[in-house]
Amino acid sequence: PHIDVLAAFYTHAEINDYLDSLPARFPKRVQLKQFGWSYERRPLKVVTITNGDGRRNKPVILIDGTVHAREWISPSMALYVIQQLLDNYVDNQELMLDYDWVIMPVVNADGYEYTHTVDRYWRKSRRPTSNPDCIGTDINRNFGYEWGHDEGSSSDPCEAIYRGERPFDQPESQVLRDVMLHYGGRLNFYLSLHSYGNYFLLPWGYTSVFPDTYQDMMSVADAGAKAIIYSTNGIYSYGSTYYVLYPTSGDTTDFALGVVNATVSMTMELPAAGFQGFDPWVSHIERLVTESWVGVRAMAAEVIRRYPA
Ligand code: 0X9
Ligand code: ZN
């Protein structure tokens, strides 16, 4: 089942059906792996895309989407990246010469399903908490690096940034952690797709101190921001999450840098369409994903240039 990314938003089941169809269509270039299940037992799948040359252990660019359920442009963007790499090989083959791409379009599958069926603005997971009145944990506060600070996360299950009882007590966080660790030694670029706001957010989220590699990561963000403004006049702000947006602790980007040692670790807050922040109109998908692809492509190219295989 082919998916026209520009024509609609898709459910988790539809996205999985599409991912399932890829290995048969691209037997030499696609590997599909299920890394686990969500709390409500939805299969969580990850697609690896190569140029099919059979070379193993190339450095990896890992992209995830839908850590937050309501940020619907993020799975669309992840699918758009998959289709650029597979269906537009001619234009993008240099990006796969020495690097492999690993893409997980939906991390928070239960929350995402819930935004299609019950509450369009749900953010967290769907696992019950110690408080019977409040459901769900923020996957992006549940990761086990500098987890548990009251600055940047909450111990209250009713809050939007509830961090869980323990790091990685959500199955969805465990799965994304396992994906990261699986590609661990060769994770050169970790990019987590969120919305919205036109930001490239770098670690650390948990402290105002900058990581040693901050300037290197800023050069990559710089390449993305320049490419976007030259091509579409889109304006990105970028820098440490702590300063550019707000403190966050236990998020995926800090874990990818602090524990997995990713060379470049970044959150991309994709653009909104006018006042439509979390729920852009379908007619806006094309503009949002094509503009964002200009940035992702430029950042990938810069990572590949700076860190040759
Ligand atoms: O608060 C968040 O989790 C992210 N913003 S959102 O509006 N999508 O919820 C920002 C997280 C950024 N963290 C790091 N880059 N460390
Ligand atoms: Zn988010």
Image (cartoon, rainbow, N blue to C red):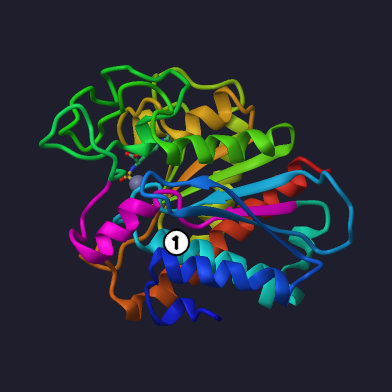
Q: Position of residue 194 (x, y in %)?
A: 40, 51
Viewer-proximal residue among 138 and 289: 138
Residue 115 on the magenta span: yes
Residue 161 picture location, percent across and down: 25, 34
Q: Residue at x 72, y 68 (%)?
A: 92
Q: Quadrant of ligand 1?
A: top left
Question: Is 164 on the left or on the right of 95, as rendered?
Answer: left
The percent coordinates of residue 49 (x first, y second) are: 71, 60
Q: Quadrant of the C terminus?
A: top right
Q: Residue furthest left?
A: 133
> Pointer 1: residues within 10 angstroms few (<14), some, or many (20+)?
many
In-image side of 58 versus 137 (left or right): right
Q: Quadrant of residue 286?
A: bottom left
Chain part drawn in magenta: 100-123
Choose between 83 and 299: the one closer to the eye: 83
Indicate the secondary structure of the residue bearing disc 1.
Answer: helix
Q: Is residue 197 at least partly visible in the picture?
A: no
The amino acid type of the residue labelled 1 equals: Pro
Asked if residue 133 is positioned above or below residue 237 in the image, the reply reads above
Question: Dividing the picture into quarters, in which one does residue 208 lie?
Answer: top left
